[in-house]
Image (tube, grey):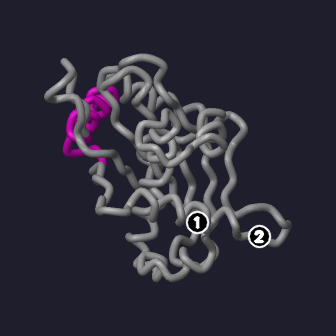
Amino acid sequence: QGQLWVGLDHGAAAGKQAVALLVIDNPRNLAPRIWVLDCHVAEGRTTPEDDARTILEMLARNGCKYDDVDGWVGDRSVGRARWDVDKSNKELREFLAHELRRPVRQTKFIETPKKWSGSVLYGFRLINAVMARRDSDGGSNFRIHPRCRELVDAIKTFNGDSRHPGKDVLDAVRYPIEAAVRRAGSSWMAGGVVAAYS
């Protein structure tokens, strides 16, 4: 049930690489359900090879395979000018192909999130709107697995500052949600429903 998504916030500096695994159900509906199954924030600096292995390990420990993933979203390229390693969707896709022992053309495209002035606020308001909804058993429509400690800490402490250490994992979660809503053509993209529940 639902679609399986991987979200990435690329980071070349230590502790800046974050990845999240989500199931998103019914993003067109006014009450989508979202499960954050897993997340990982690197403790130090990583290479694209490290990131590819981390993602495949994350999928495996959740009983999933690479080909089970319905959507991939990764942040813009980073590191080219300042660091000695480039982090990009293209690089990651190449190393995923290497780990999977298949040609790059047989791997899935990793889309880049849409960004505009106010897009961060929009994304977090969208998440808040889902969290505010309740399903038939009274639980939130946004559920987080207990293993996602970094995400829970980020939600509790994020202060809106783009330099806040929790923003990376929050971005890794919001990118797939925004993409799924956009792909579904939901009226949420107009902002009206988000405003109603924010």
User: Looking at the figure, which quarter contains the N terminus?
Assistant: bottom right
- Would residue 65 be seen by someone viewing this image from the given angle? no
For image coordinates 45% across by 32% down, the residue present is 56
For mark 1, give the secondary structure. Answer: strand
Residue nearest the observer in this picture, 48 or 114: 114
Quadrant hosting residue 107: top left
Q: Residue 181 placed where, x, y %?
A: 45, 69
Q: Residue at x 41, y 43 (%)?
A: 162
Name the residue: 51% across, 58% down: 124
Q: Nearer the viewer, residue 178 or 122?
A: 122
**Mark 2 — residue?**
135
Q: Position of residue 55 (x, y in %)?
A: 44, 33
Q: Which residues are magenta?
A: 89-108
Tell me the tag on residue 25: 1
User: Which label sits on residue 119?
Assistant: none
Count neighbours of disc 1 (C-alpha within 10 A) and say few if under 14, some if 14 to 19, many if 20 or more.
some
